[in-house]
Image: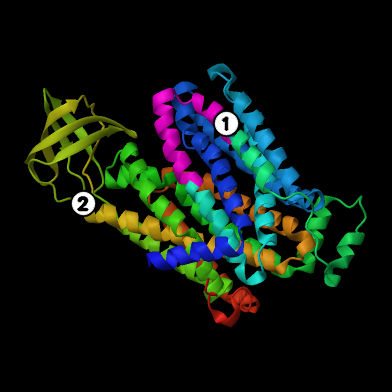
Amino acid sequence: MIGRLVRSYLYVFQHYPALIGMGVIVIVMQLAWSLVMFVLPLYFKHQLHQSSAIGFVLLAFLGTETLLKPWFGELGDRWGRKPMILAGCAVAMLAMGLCYLPTSSSWWLFLPLMTLNGMAAAAIWPAVTAYMGERVPVHDKAAAMSVFEGGYLVGFGAGGAAGLYLGGVLGNRMLFLIAVVFFLGAMALTAVLVKSGVYREESSKFDEYDTLPEVQSLLQSGVALLREIPMLSRLMFVYVMSQFAVTAMAPIVSLYGVQELGRSQEEMAGLFLGPMMVVAAFGVAMGRLADAIGKVRAVKLCYLVAAGCLVLMFAARAPQPGEVIKLDGKTVTAKRPRRDDMQIGDVLTVRREAESVARVRVSEVEDDRFAAELVSGRPRLGDGVFVKAHAWQIVLLLVSLTLLGLAYALGAPSLLGLGSAVAPQVKQGQALGLMNAAQGVGSCLGVITGPLLYDRVSPQAPIVMAGVMFALCVFYAQARLGELSGVGPSPGGRAASP
């Protein structure tokens, strides 16, 4: 297994050395954004005292990125990838530096500043994916995209962990200035490693694109491309559905761990880092697997596995929390949680909302309630008492998250690889910009819907909905992407040996 993983990396990087530098650039840029994004909700709650505004701020970022990706992708086709990446890093540096300034009375300044960050992301990511896709043949497109996804996940996981740690040591506000330094480093790497110029390849089938009037709007150009390549719109639809499922579930996973498994937020952050690093390590191998079995088959396989993972996650539930109903000195009486096997001597956590406020040791167990002696902290009436999950439940959650991440590492590069494969070379940036826009649409819908279902319906509702969406992706891919079945496998039907 390890040998095959090493060979996968060696094959990609030996045959396409330009991807090494791009992978490093992706890691640095995503690390800069993750440093901030992971702690932004905490910053708004504790420093700015505006926790209700965080949704609007994140939507400003995601919405702007989604709207501008297709148009910035086409600008990259015309101007070149390198200028778009450099311009995006410069705008991100400016926005992150200015984010250091707002106070609790001027928090609204984050709306235009996050809009600028969204513009930067919209300029950078289509240019990066197009640049990587242009430097590999069709049968290795997914491998190239897996380098992007692997770098993205490394930056995402490492940036999130570093942000939580550095924010606690230096203060969350300092993270904006640290992000500026990382974007400056990304600019320097781009200036050295990324080639200048606009990639062009003769394609008589799409010569008419070179004769389009300059006055034609970017929107009309995008519609024209979708009409010329109907398969691209089908791929975008799958990307919307799958990303909707992912982002509906992603914001509530830590909350799910707290409420359903009785773990603290700090414990959940440490638990998530392991699966993230495993996915990052095997990201390129997943791309090689997609190239070996065919990208359409990889898409169907990944969503089938994702739906199964959500069944496992749904099963990894600890008892529902009990409620403190009586306080008598150091003795706490609470309703007994459902589905538990509580025993005398168990140490339980008492939480108020998501914050741990006390720990108690069980001293007496009855049918519908239990008594416990206070170990630390000071609970109030109505606080929740959590029974920690068993080891098998934690393992089940970690396995499901790891497999879900590996499925994403298999499916996302396959979709991007298919989008790159069906588009003409002169329209790579625009096609991948449209694919990234579809991802953004799904993200915007999911980030709103998931937390709403969690609060209004149940903690399990986003997981059930995501599972249904993944199942629909499998059926739609089976019905509508069949004619692409021949796109993507390496010559001979298997991955080429390094």
Residue at (56% x, 60% y) in the render: 13
**Which of the two residues, 275 or 15, is positioned nearer the viewer here?**
15
**Is the stretch drawn in magenta largely helix, strand or loop?**
helix
**Which numbered circle lies on residue 390?**
2
Q: Amino acid at mark 1?
A: Val
Residue at mark 1 to residue at mark 2: CA–CA distance = 42 Å
Along the horizontal axis of the image, is 161 left or right of 328? right
Along the horizontal axis of the image, is 332 left or right of 115? left
Say which of marks 1 and 2 sits in front.
1
Q: Position of residue 147 (x, y in %)?
A: 55, 57
Q: Position of residue 271 (x, y in %)?
A: 33, 46
- Which part of the image, by quadrant, shows the N terminus? bottom left
**Which numbered circle lies on residue 324?**
none
Q: Amino acid at mark 2?
A: His
Q: Quadrant of residue 118?
A: top right
Is residue 336 on the magenta stretch? Answer: no
How dense is the environment of label 1, judged by Cα within 10 Å: few (below 14), some, or many (20 and up)?
A: some
Q: Are marks 1 and 2 in contact (CB under 8 Å)?
A: no
Please tell me whether residue 358 is drawn above or below residue 59 in the rendered image: above
Which segment is the magenta one?
155-182
Along the horizontal axis of the image, is 356 left or right of 111? left
**Which of the two residues, 403 or 458, is positioned nearer the viewer here?**
403
**Which numbered circle lies on residue 181?**
1
Q: Is residue 413 visible?
A: no
Residue at (27% x, 52% y) in the render: 394
